[in-house]
C-alpha cells in the first residue's frame, strides 16, 4: 500500500515568484473552495516577470519533454464548469527535454501584456488571469502549477457626463420627477439627486432607492440573467405632499461594486441600475429603473 501512495506523490515542488512581488500591491481573491488569498495586482500593458523554481524531492529525478510557462486570460461559465475560454494566451519555453536532478530556477518575462478585461468573479461567470507552469512528461501525467493574479484597469473621468432626468406617473394619481447629477460614476463616487412630487393622490407609505447589478451570461436561448440588489437606501418614510422635494445622497464606497462590463468577449455583461421603488398603503409597488455606468478611477 505504501508503494502505491508513493507512486502518486508529486515528483517535485514548483514555486512561482514575481520579480517585484515584495513591493507590488496585493489584493484579496476568492478561490473556488471559498477561501480568500492575497494575490498580486496588475493592469494592462504592464510587464509580468519573475522566477520559476523546480526542486525534485529527495532522491528523485525528473525526466521531462520540456518546461514551459503560459500566461492565460480565461473566462469560465459556471453552467459549463471546467471549460475555460482563453482570450489571452502567451507562452515562454523554459527548458528543452532533459532531466532535472536538483533545484533549477528559470527566469521568465512577458512584456507589455495586453490584458483588456478586468478580473471578475460573479454569480454565473468568472474571468481570471493565471500563470501556468507545465513540465511535460512521457510517462505519467504532466506536472502543473498555477499562480493567480488580479487585473484592474483604470479610466479617466468621462468628458461628457450628462445628468439623468426622469418621470414616474400614474394618470391623475401620481406624478413624480427625479434627477441624478450624472449618469457615470466611479467606484468611490456619491450619487446626488432630487425627487419632486408634482401630483400625489395615492397614499405612499415609503420610498427606497436600490442599486442593482444585472449579470447576463451566454447568448440567445442560453442567456442566464442574475439580478442582485446590492444596496437599499430609504428615501422617505411616510406620505409626501404635493410640491415637496426630497434630496438624495448615496455613497457608493461601502458597496462591493465592479466597473460596468459590456459584452466581454461575447460571453457576459455586467450592468448597474438605480431602481426607485414606491410602496403605497395597500402594498402596491411602483418602480422606475435607470441604468448607470460605473468605472474605475485611477487612485491618487
Image (cartoon, grey):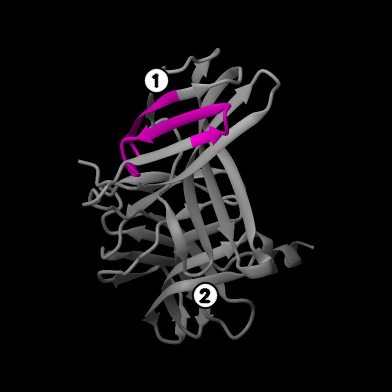
SS category of the residue bearing label 1 = strand
Q: Is residue 128 visible?
A: yes
Q: Residue at x 63, y 22 (%)?
A: 280
- Prevailing secondary structure class for the magenta stretch in the rendered image: strand
**CB atoms of marks 1 and 2 within 8 Å:** no
Asked if residue 174 is among those painted magenta in the image, a careful observer would answer yes
Which residue is the site of mark 2? 61
Q: Is residue 295 depicted above or below 85 in this figure?
A: above
**Left or right, residue 255 beside residue 181:** right
Closer to us: 183 or 187? 183
**Snapshot quadrant of residue 248:** top left
**Left or right, residue 78 beside residue 62:** right
**Snapshot quadrant of residue 191:** top left
Q: Is residue 59 visible?
A: no
How far is mark 1 from mark 2, CA to CA? 77 Å
Which residue is the site of mark 1? 245
The location of residue 205, given as percent across then percent down, is: 60, 17
The quarter of the image holding the C terminus is top left
Closer to us: 186 or 209? 209
The location of residue 276, given as percent across then percent down, is: 51, 33
Q: Is residue 300 depicted above or below 48 in this figure?
A: above
**Left or right, residue 165 beside residue 65:** left
Asked if residue 287 is among those painted magenta in the image, a careful observer would answer no
The location of residue 173, given as percent across then percent down, is: 58, 26
Closer to us: 57 or 134? 134
Residue range (magenta): 168-197
Amino acid at each position: 500500500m505504501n508503494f502505491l501512495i508513493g507512486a502518486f506523490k508529486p515528483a517535485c515542488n514548483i514555486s512561482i515568484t514575481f520579480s517585484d512581488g515584495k513591493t507590488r500591491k496585493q489584493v484579496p481573491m476568492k478561490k473556488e473552495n471559498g477561501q480568500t488569498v492575497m494575490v498580486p495586482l496588475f493592469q494592462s500593458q504592464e510587464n509580468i516577470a519573475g522566477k520559476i523554481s523546480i526542486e525534485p524531492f529527495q532522491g528523485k529525478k525528473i525526466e521531462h519533454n520540456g518546461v514551459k510557462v503560459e500566461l492565460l486570460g480565461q473566462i469560465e461559465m459556471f453552467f459549463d464548469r471546467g471549460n475555460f475560454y482563453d482570450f489571452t494566451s502567451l507562452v515562454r519555453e523554459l527548458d528543452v527535454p532533459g532531466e532535472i536532478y536538483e533545484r533549477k530556477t528559470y527566469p521568465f518575462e512577458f512584456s507589455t501584456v495586453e490584458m483588456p478585461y478586468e478580473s471578475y468573479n460573479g454569480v454565473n461567470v468568472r474571468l481570471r488571469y493565471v500563470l501556468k507552469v507545465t513540465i511535460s512528461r512521457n510517462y505519467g501525467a504532466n506536472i502543473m502549477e498555477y499562480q493567480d493574479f488580479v487585473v484592474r484597469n483604470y479610466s479617466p473621468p468621462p468628458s461628457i457626463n450628462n445628468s439623468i432626468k426622469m418621470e414616474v406617473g400614474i394618470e391623475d394619481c401620481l406624478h413624480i420627477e427625479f434627477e441624478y447629477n450624472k449618469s457615470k460614476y466611479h467606484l468611490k463616487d456619491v450619487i446626488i439627486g432630487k425627487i419632486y412630487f408634482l401630483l400625489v393622490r395615492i397614499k405612499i407609505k415609503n420610498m427606497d432607492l436600490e442599486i442593482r447589478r444585472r449579470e447576463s451570461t451566454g447568448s440567445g436561448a442560453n442567456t442566464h440573467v442574475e439580478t442582485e440588489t446590492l444596496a437599499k437606501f430609504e428615501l422617505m418614510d411616510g406620505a409626501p405632499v404635493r410640491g415637496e422635494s426630497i434630496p438624495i445622497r448615496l455613497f457608493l464606497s461601502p458597496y462591493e461594486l465592479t466597473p460596468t462590463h459590456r459584452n466581454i468577449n461575447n460571453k457576459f455583461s455586467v450592468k448597474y441600475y438605480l431602481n426607485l421603488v414606491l410602496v403605497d398603503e395597500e402594498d402596491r409597488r411602483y418602480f422606475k429603473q435607470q441604468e448607470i455606468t460605473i468605472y474605475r478611477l485611477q487612485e491618487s
